[in-house]
Amino acid sequence: MKRIFTLIFVSVFGFSVTLQAQLNMGTGPGWGSLFPTEPLVLDDDFSGYTFFHSDSTTDMGNSNNTFDPVTQEIIYGYMDTVFNFPFIGSTVNAVYDCKQVAFAPEWKTAWAFRDGTDNTANVSDGFIEVSREYGSNPGTIAGHFIVDLRELSYVEVIQWTHSSCGGNKRGVMIEWGIPSADTIVWDTLRYQPGNPWNESFTKDVYTGEKTPNGYRCDPSAYGMVWEDGVWSDQGILLRFTACGYPQVPRIHDLKVYGTIGATASKKIGQPGLKVFTYDRIIRISEIAKVEVFNITGKMVRYKDNTNKVFVSDLPGGIYIVKTQAGNSTKTSKVFLR
């Protein structure tokens, strides 16, 4: 009996350690791990907008629609709006489609304001707040913040930050959409609930594989810093919403790396040969012949009939990747960290 008890104890204890090892208490993966090589084409920190929020300070909670019993008026805390934001060095624009959002262009994160300290590094003051479904009077419905990037012929990497309206462990979801006929097909790019943290994941846009990341968003009231690979030439849209335990997300920064070019209507159904790296794997958008050379010109990897080359054993540095798929060829420079 004693031996059986010991075995059960060890099993339970080991299971607990495994769970705890998956928990990530940090402020997100940060910026730079995906090594974007395309130029920065959109950079918004949501400053300069007209203030629109029902609260007087950033730590008082989410904005909401309220009914004033004295004046018999509805005080709107969220609004619907559509406007343009210029791409860097271009006459064309991204389009922001906002449903039930609030703006606070100068506010800190909730707890940085409360504690008289700084936001998490890279998290700017000012944000756009996306509503959740909330039982105010009148009721507040769940909203979204859509960024229309269809004027970009290629979207490589996005970097962005978010915070919560107060309290910790509060997350956000970002999806990417590809227009198809008269509809938009949405797919999750990052699902980042604060609770339950073990459901959080990022999704590979080519393989559809979900990668659990275990970020609990504990510091969300000071700000979280995210980076996601898109690697799409199909003219996409991004959509930010609340998720999981439904709390209000505040988006503080959005950076997009890509190529300004043909609109999506000319690109849909015409994917090019793309090469990118993630988690020490060279990925190709099609099945191809792949040759990898180091900076001295020595071939260090050769694979045929594949779209994935594992390079975890190679030292960090710059590599040249030559790919051929049918009549399409491409030579790319990649950086292994």
Image: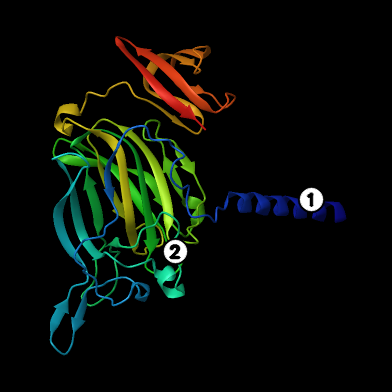
| Label 2 crowd (10 A; few <14 / some 14-19 / many >=20) | many
Query: How far apart are the two marked residues, 2 and 1, measured between alpha carbons?
Result: 43 Å
Pinpoint residue 94: horizontal percent, then vertical percent: 19, 45
Q: What kind of element bears circle 2?
A: loop
Q: Amino acid at mark 2?
A: Tyr
Q: Is residue 291 left or right of residue 92?
A: right
Q: Nearer the viewer, residue 297 or 172?
A: 297
- Indicate which disc residue 222 carries: 2
| Label 1 crowd (10 A; few <14 / some 14-19 / many >=20) | few
Pinpoint residue 242: horizontal percent, then vertical percent: 34, 58
Looking at the image, can residue 329 be seen? yes
Q: Nearer the viewer, residue 271 or 10?
A: 271
On-image quarter of the N terminus:
bottom right
Pinpoint residue 302: horizontal percent, then vertical percent: 50, 12
Looking at the image, can residue 1 be seen? no
Residue matched to label 1: 7
Q: Is residue 183 above or below residue 117?
A: above
Q: Amino acid at mark 1?
A: Leu
Looking at marks 2 and 1 on the same chain, the residue that comes earlier in the sequence is marked by 1
